[in-house]
Amino acid sequence: MDFSWTPKQSELRESVVGFAQNDLAAEAPQGQFAAAAWKRCADFGIQGFNIPKAYGGWGLDMLSTVYAMEGFGYGCPDPAFSYALSAQMWSLQPALQHFGSEKQKQEYLLPLCRAELMGSFAMTEPESGSNTANLKTLATKKLDTYVITGTKEFVTFGPLADFALIFASTNPGHGAWGTSAFLIDKGTPGFVQSEALEKFGLHSTPLGKFELDHCEIHESQRLGPEGVGMSIFSKVMESERAYILTPHLGAMERQLEQTITFVKDRQQGGVSIGKYQSVSNRIVDMKLRLELAKMMLYKTAWLQDTGQSLQIEAPLTKLCLSESFVSSSLDSIRTFGARGFMQKYSVGGDLMDAVGSLIYGGTADIQRMVIARLLGL
């Protein structure tokens, strides 16, 4: 594994950092979703980094993509907006790319890369999260249509979505292998989108709920053959768990630099507080987490680029990055003291957004359970 960066990769990352720090800043107010910033990102090409050129993307290899998105997280002061980009790039887009028909790719994937459409990936239900075998949403075949009834909750972009990828059971007797996926457009009769839910963090990424009440769609809106919902979900979860936290790696680097600057400037007893061992130890721990998380992410991307399995690396990467970001955010707040609790500084907001990463894409407990099973436990 060679993780030295080519001049082209380094140039791309720096251009992304500059875009996020300068061009994007005025368009992305923290605390609310910024549609103008989203469109600016699409104009730059970010939503298409990992998408083939035929569908509006750059066709980048995975190492180049994660290095660029790491730079986006470094330059963007709002981890919630970075998460929003990742949620589309690593869940909805891969589902369409790998399982969509040519017509569906042209109708949905290409407009997603151009920010002409916004979509949602909807699996979670009131009684199930990552468990595709326990879906209560039902899709009943009726000639050349499906009638879908059920509820989806905690849906990223739910209130704003122009369409949704909905997972439903088409054959309950087959459990997870009786699951299918459907593309449902906004405004379809029987498809109701809720208002945005109030959250402790991720304020600039709206989450909502879908109610489907005898929502009838044509069979051409099914994604892939009937019964392959489990395969679609598994493919997407591998992608999401491996890469959805990539921008947080850049945020951790920015956080570390800000904390080092602060401890050098802040004095107590006539010396900078960085000279106190309890403070410097926290800084070292932040640096160690950052470097370990980088190696985990880069290894995972390298494995994908070389055609190898990410079966265990994907949950390991998700677990490593999420818990590292939370721990480093806490260390940063402790180091800033009372200032870290003030809204003037970003470290408090980083913590609340970091906590969300322990939940979405499968909780930290779910990741541990998946890893344990893969280890034969």
Image (cartoon, rainbow, N blue to C red):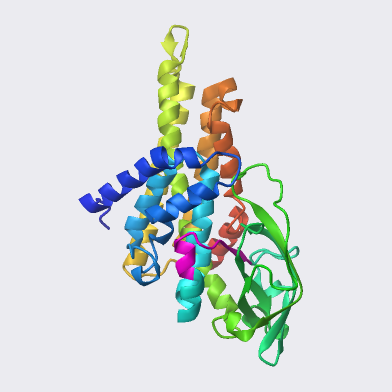
> Residue 162 placed where, x, y %?
60, 64
Please identify the quarter of the rendering in which residue 217 is found: bottom right
> Residue 150 placed where, x, y %?
75, 71
The one nearer the camera, 190 or 197, is 190
Q: Is residue 78 visible?
A: yes
The one nearer the camera, 93 or 137, is 93
Residue sitting at the far right: 213
Please identify the quarter of the rendering in which residue 289 is found: top left
Assess whether residue 129 is covered by the magenta stretch: no
Q: Is residue 101 visible?
A: no
Image check: 42 left or right of 148?
left
Please identify the quarter of the rendering in which residue 56 is found: bottom left
Is 87 located above or below residue 56 in the figure? above
Residue range highlighted in magenta? 109-122
Q: Residue at x 42, y 36 (%)?
A: 254
> Residue 235 placed where, x, y %?
50, 71
Is 76 located above or below residue 97 in the figure? above
Residue sitting at the far bottom: 143
Name the quadrant of the N terminus. Answer: bottom left
Name the quadrant of the C terminus. Answer: bottom right
Q: Residue at x 45, y 34 (%)?
A: 255
Is 199 located above or below residue 178 in the figure? above
Image check: 320 left or right of 141?
left
The one nearer the camera, 85 or 227, is 85
Q: Residue at x 54, y 27 (%)?
A: 345
> Residue 122 placed where, x, y %?
63, 66
